[in-house]
Image (spheres, rainbow, N blue to C red):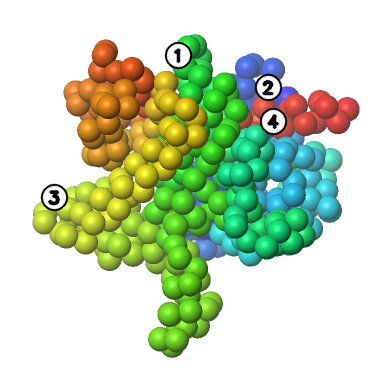
């Protein structure tokens, strides 16, 4: 079975086609960036989908199923076949994932129109985190908010955390307590014991937890009151927190860590602060999750920042030998490849594990469709 896995952002569309009959080997892939931006060839996601399907058709790679790395389905926290109910539920939770849910809903409708006989599966990012204990899911809010409106911590980046934690267990079979750092445009930590998620730094929405490239991360909601009294509208504040904050807001320069590191090396204090805040936030959650897991056997880094930014990894691991985390400075210079980067004497092994979210989504798609039939 050929599975087309779609990974969408508000201005991006990445895809892979994987063959389930060949151990999910990738037979086609593509990436479209800056969709709808000035001076770009692609005005819309619809144009991109046409281009993808035309190319695949020409190459004899028409998909038998489509899997979506879907983000927020509220009460639907698993991999499910897409139908009207799934789309309606995603619509209800679109305000909690505004950069993701609307583009996924539109893509699902477009694919259904262009490939009417091809089944679609939404593999929700929250699925892997269903094993998190209730005490780490609940906010201290009126219980009605939780039970009637689903206001709780969900956790995201499920496909990436699932892949990296499963891979870590293959690389180090004795590692029971694993903490994975998915660091990129959007970032989170996940703690797992025996392969099951027990904690995630992301909460009700993908805006929370660590600072992201342009999203705020953790933030006191009562600051909204102060800002509205200063004349900002709620829409303006939320737009700033979701699009102009994070590394971009702190550095006042860029949402790309490479640019920020370069500026910090040139003496830019705002850029240095952005890096320091990111590292401090990762260490904050790392400490909390080591307590939650009852220790740590393996620490892994993935995502564009996690796999490439040696400075961030070094900052996270600095002076943690008392926890059994001992990074090898020489091995830490490695980029973008699966490798152990801890010293031999480190009680917890430290790894770079390049993630493969599409493989997880393709597997979930096949499992879901096979189970249905």
| Label whose residue precedes the other's in the sequence (1 or 3) | 1
Q: Which residue is mark 1?
A: 172
Picture residue at 55% right of the left edge, 62% below the top: 43
Separation of marks 1 and 3 at Cα, in angstroms: 36 Å
Name the outermost residue toward the right. Answer: 373
The percent coordinates of residue 331 (x first, y second) are 24, 22
Q: Which secondary structure, mark 1?
A: loop
The percent coordinates of residue 325 (x first, y second) are 31, 25
* Marks 1 & 4, CB-CB < 8 Å contact: no
* Horizontal side of residue 313 vs 287, given as left or right: left
Between 327 and 27, the one lying in front of the other is 327
* Horizontal side of residue 130 vs 167, given as left or right: right
Separation of marks 1 and 2 at Cα, in angstroms: 26 Å
The mark lying in front, picked from 3 and 2, is 3
The disc at residue 265 is 3
Between 112 and 334, the one lying in front of the other is 334
Separation of marks 2 and 4 at Cα, in angstroms: 11 Å
Is any part of residue 318 visible from this angle?
yes
Q: Which residue is mark 2?
A: 20
The percent coordinates of residue 66 (x first, y second) are 71, 38
| Label whose residue precedes the other's in the sequence (4 or 3) | 3
The quarter of the picture where the C terminus appears is top right
Classify mark 4: residues with Cα within 10 Å, few (<14), some (14-19) or many (20+).
many
The percent coordinates of residue 349 (x first, y second) are 36, 19
The mark lying in front, picked from 2 and 4, is 4
Q: Which secondary structure, mark 4?
A: helix
The disc at residue 364 is 4
Picture residue at 23% right of the left edge, 56% below the top: 273
* Marks 1 & 3, CB-CB < 8 Å contact: no
Q: Which secondary structure, mark 3?
A: helix
Classify mark 2: residues with Cα within 10 Å, few (<14), some (14-19) or many (20+).
some
* Marks 4 & 3, CB-CB < 8 Å contact: no
């Amino acid at each position: 079975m050929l599975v087309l896995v779609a990974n969408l952002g508000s201005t991006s569309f990445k895809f892979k086609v994987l063959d389930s009959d060949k151990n999910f080997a990738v037979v086609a892939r593509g990436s479209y960036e800056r969709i709808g931006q000035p001076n770009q060839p692609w005005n819309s996601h619809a144009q991109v989908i046409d281009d993808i399907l035309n190319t695949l058709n020409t190459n004899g790679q028409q998909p038998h199923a489509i899997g979506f790395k879907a983000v927020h389905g509220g009460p639907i926290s698993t991999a499910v076949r897409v139908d009207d109910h799934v789309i309606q539920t995603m619509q209800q939770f679109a305000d909690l994932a505004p950069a993701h849910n609307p583009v996924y809903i539109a893509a699902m409708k477009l694919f259904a129109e262009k490939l009417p006989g091809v089944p679609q599966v939404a593999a929700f990012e929250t699925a892997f985190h269903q094993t998190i204990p209730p005490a780490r899911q609940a906010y201290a809010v009126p219980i009605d908010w939780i039970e009637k409106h689903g206001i709780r911590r969900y956790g995201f980046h499920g496909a990436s955390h699932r892949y990296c934690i499963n891979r870590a267990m293959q690389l180090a079979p004795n590692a029971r307590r694993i903490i994975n750092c998915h660091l990129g445009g959007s970032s989170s930590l996940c703690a797992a014991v025996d392969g099951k998620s027990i904690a995630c730094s992301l909460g009700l929405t993908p805006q929370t937890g660590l600072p992201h490239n342009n999203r705020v991360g953790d933030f006191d909601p009562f600051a909204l009151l102060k800002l509205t009294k200063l004349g900002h509208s709620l829409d303006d504040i939320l737009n700033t927190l979701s699009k102009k904050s994070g590394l971009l807001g702190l550095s006042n320069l860029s949402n790309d860590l490479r640019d920020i590191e370069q500026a910090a090396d040139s003496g830019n204090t705002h850029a240095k602060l952005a890096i320091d805040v990111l590292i401090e936030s990762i260490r904050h959650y790392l400490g909390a999750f080591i307590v939650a897991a009852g220790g740590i056997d393996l620490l892994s880094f993935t995502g564009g920042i996690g796999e490439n930014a040696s400075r961030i990894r070094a900052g996270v691991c600095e002076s943690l030998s008392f926890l059994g985390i001992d990074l090898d400075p020489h091995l830490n210079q490695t980029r973008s490849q699966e490798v152990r980067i801890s010293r031999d004497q480190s009680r917890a092994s430290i790894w770079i594990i390049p993630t493969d979210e599409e493989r997880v989504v393709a597997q979930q798609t096949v499992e879901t469709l096979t189970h249905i039939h």
